[in-house]
């Protein structure tokens, strides 16, 4: 692309800085990165036109991408980079110590350095290996404190309890991040026990590094790692030698343990296919593996299988893996009855490795096997495996079993357009109740159970689907067997379902609702509940009823979604710090759950009334103004109102209070006993003033 075309794209982005225009411009600048200074004048005009006060994500990404180029460090550019950082930085990292470590406020730090630090910060995770280029220290990251701007590392060869935090700024300036793995031990080993060649060292370092490495980085890593004991002369000879070491000559198929095969595979060229002789060697290794060794190293074995599958033909894979079919827990002989724990490795692998393992499984087994496995695996694995299965086979299996796991139910619901009529009918209230009634599921399966439970309780679309699928009578009959629901949850669900269906509401009012609410209660609990409710509604004004409905609506539509986002944000802090925000969000969730249950329970029995329509006579009814004369001759006026209408400052008295109960349904002239033990006489019963009636509307 010539200079004029680039200038034209800059002008277009200046006039309309849309995501598409900025992306096209970035691609053009990347092609002409070496001549970036030739466009300084035009780019400055573009930068001056961009709004740093209200920056959207596409603009922020463009600024950070261009900032990586060697552009001029002007006040405008620094302002835009600062705004981009603020826009893209996750809330849990948006603290002053983090901003200082990024160098945003230091005019001496070029924009390209800020961008580099930002990328390193956002890549930082617990469990990664950190090499500090300035001191040669190696360690494992165990936490980031965004309030103090320090990174905790467990230094190699040092007791973790004695380790101190490393300033984040130092990590971002001189730190090099690696994914953890056995191979890192080889390049960090100052005793050079593995006798790596420089070629092997460079291959491992580049493959395990999270961000790209320069030759200077590689040389520094080597000098503080496997080449530390070398003299300058020996190092130079080693560094420039292109021959492989003795270790490298050993092939991965010659490994004696799963761990050794992992290391050897990492040092080999992943693009080179295996020979038939090497495939046979792998087959012999797997045939000799004892079952107890496999069980102890399930994840490592799965990762080895994934890696060798990329370099083998289908015929070679069969030779390699056939010895594992009868003794590998994540490929059970009978998937329908497989123990959950034995399948947990499917949730421990990365998404990429799960997809590859799923593809290998499809090649190794029949479609009915894949269908059986689909009804046992966690959702994370189903996203890769189930699309490969035959929906007809899966439908036949689920029909035969009369069950569908929490995870598979969720997968079908989330992929209902793809699954279509072939599978969606298995998402029904009976299968859901059976699935949610399962207890003591391993950790990998609890998230889906919780998500399906939340769908049932809170998702209006899901609830409407279940009503339409089952009908009112079948749905209420099924819910009586949903003993995994607490009484509060059952009440809440009944209220929500009734809101969505007049047919269901009518059916519940016929007495089915009481049966559902009493499901799972003992006879004593049922009697106590009946006595408490007494089938008598609670009366309150239209105003209070509206407020309660609005509070419930706000909890469902505003506060619960906000709380879910707060929990996501707090979880995103990850393992970086003691998560007080997560604890606070959980407490808020518990409060909202309790309050929602209370409101739904109360609203089931509330009868709103229009106070204006009340005819007031000689009896104190809800909607009366009542005047009392006490024994000492003093008078007091009370407005006897609904259960949630009380307001002591205005003398609004709920008929459910002790004094309200003493007055309620009493006649003019009756003598009553007040809660304080004193007596009073009702001398007047009237219609309230207009001001009171307005308050109750």
Image (cartoon, rainbow, N blue to C red):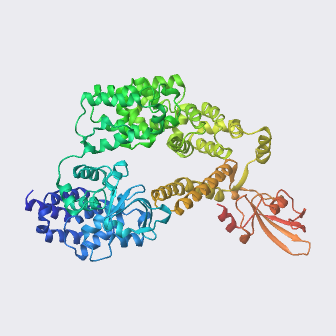
**Residue 439 spot, x, y in % from top left:** 61, 38
**Residue 663 spot, x, y in % from top left:** 83, 61
At x 22% / y 50%, what residue is drawn? Answer: 199
Q: Is residue 420 above or below residue 55?
A: above
Along the line of sight, the residue nearer the viewer: 466 or 367 = 367
Q: Is residue 684 left or right of residue 314?
A: right
Residue 127, quarter of picture: bottom left
Q: Is residue 537 above or below residue 358?
A: below
**Residue 3 spot, x, y in % from top left:** 8, 62
Along the line of sight, the residue nearer the viewer: 132 or 259 = 259
**Residue 135 spot, x, y in % from top left:** 33, 67
Q: Is residue 180 above or below residue 515?
A: below
Residue 50 can be seen, yes or no: no
Along the line of sight, the residue nearer the viewer: 33 or 652 = 33
Residue 104, quarter of picture: bottom left
Q: Is residue 68 left or right of residue 556?
A: left
Residue 643, quarter of picture: bottom right
At x 51% / y 44%, what residue is drawn? Answer: 447
Report the number of discs. Answer: 0
Residue 71 can be seen, yes or no: yes
Q: Is residue 409 left or right of residue 535?
A: left
Along the line of sight, the residue nearer the viewer: 435 or 126 = 126
């Amino acid at each position: 692309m010539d200079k004029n075309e680039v200038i034209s794209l800059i002008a277009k982005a200046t006039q309309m800085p849309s995501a598409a225009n900025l992306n096209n411009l970035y691609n053009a600048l990347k092609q002409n990165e070496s001549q970036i200074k030739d466009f300084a004048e035009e780019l400055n005009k573009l930068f001056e036109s961009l709004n740093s006060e209200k920056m959207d994500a596409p603009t922020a990404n463009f600024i950070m991408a261009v900032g990586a180029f060697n552009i001029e460090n002007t006040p405008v550019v620094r302002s835009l980079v600062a705004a981009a950082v603020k826009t893209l930085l996750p809330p849990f990292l948006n603290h002053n110590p983090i901003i200082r470590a990024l160098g945003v406020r230091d005019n001496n730090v070029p924009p390209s350095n800020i961008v580099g630090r930002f990328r390193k910060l956002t890549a930082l995770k617990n469990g990664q290996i950190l090499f500090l280029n300035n001191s040669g220290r190696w360690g494992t990251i165990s936490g980031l404190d965004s309030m103090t701007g320090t990174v905790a590392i467990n230094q190699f060869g040092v007791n973790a309890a004695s380790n101190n935090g490393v300033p984040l700024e130092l990590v971002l300036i001189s730190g090099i991040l690696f994914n953890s793995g056995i191979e890192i031990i080889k390049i960090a080993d100052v005793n050079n026990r593995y006798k790596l060649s420089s070629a092997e060292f460079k291959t491992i370092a580049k493959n395990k590094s999270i961000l790209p490495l320069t030759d200077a980085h590689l040389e520094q890593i080597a000098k503080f790692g496997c080449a530390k004991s070398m003299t300058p002369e020996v190092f130079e000879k080693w560094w420039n030698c292109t021959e492989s070491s003795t270790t490298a000559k050993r092939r991965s198929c010659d490994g004696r343990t799963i761990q050794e095969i992992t290391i050897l595979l990492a040092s080999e060229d992943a693009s080179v296919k295996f020979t038939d002789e090497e495939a046979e060697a792998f087959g012999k290794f797997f045939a000799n593996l004892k079952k107890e060794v496999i069980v102890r190293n399930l994840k490592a074995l799965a990762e080895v299988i994934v890696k060798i599958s990329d370099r083998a033909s289908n015929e070679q894979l069969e030779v390699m893996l056939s010895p594992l079919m009868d003794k590998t827990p994540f490929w059970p002989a009978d998937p329908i009855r497989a123990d959950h724990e034995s399948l947990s490795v499917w949730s421990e692998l990365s998404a990429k490795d799960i997809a590859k393992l799923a593809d290998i499984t499809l090649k190794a087994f029949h479609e009915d096997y894949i269908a059986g496995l689909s009804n046992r695996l966690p959702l994370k694995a189903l996203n890769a495996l189930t699309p490969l299965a035959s929906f007809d086979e899966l439908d036949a299996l689920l029909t035969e079993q009369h069950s569908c796991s929490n995870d598979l139910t969720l997968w079908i619901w989330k992929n209902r357009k793809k699954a279509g009529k072939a599978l969606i009918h298995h998402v029904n209230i009976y299968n859901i109740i059976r699935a949610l009634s399962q207890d003591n599921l391993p950790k990998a399966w609890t998230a889906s159970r919780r998500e399906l439970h939340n769908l049932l309780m809170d998702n209006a679309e899901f609830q409407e689907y279940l009503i339409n699928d089952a009908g009112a009578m079948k749905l209420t009959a099924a819910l009586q067997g949903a003993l995994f629901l607490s009484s509060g949850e059952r009440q809440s669900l009944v209220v929500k379902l009734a809101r969505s269906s007049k047919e269901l509401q009518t059916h519940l009012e016929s007495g089915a609702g009481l049966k559902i609410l009493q499901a799972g209660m003992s006879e004593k609990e049922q009697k106590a509940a009946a006595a408490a409710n007494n089938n008598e509604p609670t009366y309150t004004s239209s105003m209070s009823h509206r407020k309660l409905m609005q509070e419930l609506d706000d909890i469902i539509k505003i506060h619960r979604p906000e709380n879910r986002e707060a929990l996501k944000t707090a979880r995103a802090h990850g393992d970086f710090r003691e998560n007080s925000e997560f604890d606070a969000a959980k407490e808020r969730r518990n409060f909202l759950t309790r309050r929602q249950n209370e409101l739904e329970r109360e609203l089931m029995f509330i009868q709103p009334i229009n106070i204006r329509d009340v005819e007031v006579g000689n009896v104190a009814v809800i909607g009366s103004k009542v005047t009392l004369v006490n024994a000492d001759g003093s008078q007091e006026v009370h407005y006897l109102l609904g259960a949630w209408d009380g307001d002591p400052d205005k003398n609004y008295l709920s008929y459910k209070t002790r004094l309200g109960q003493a007055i309620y349904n009493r006649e003019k002239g009756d003598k009553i006993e007040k809660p304080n033990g004193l007596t009073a006489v009702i001398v007047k019963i009237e219609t309230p003033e207009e001001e009171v009636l307005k308050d109750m509307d």
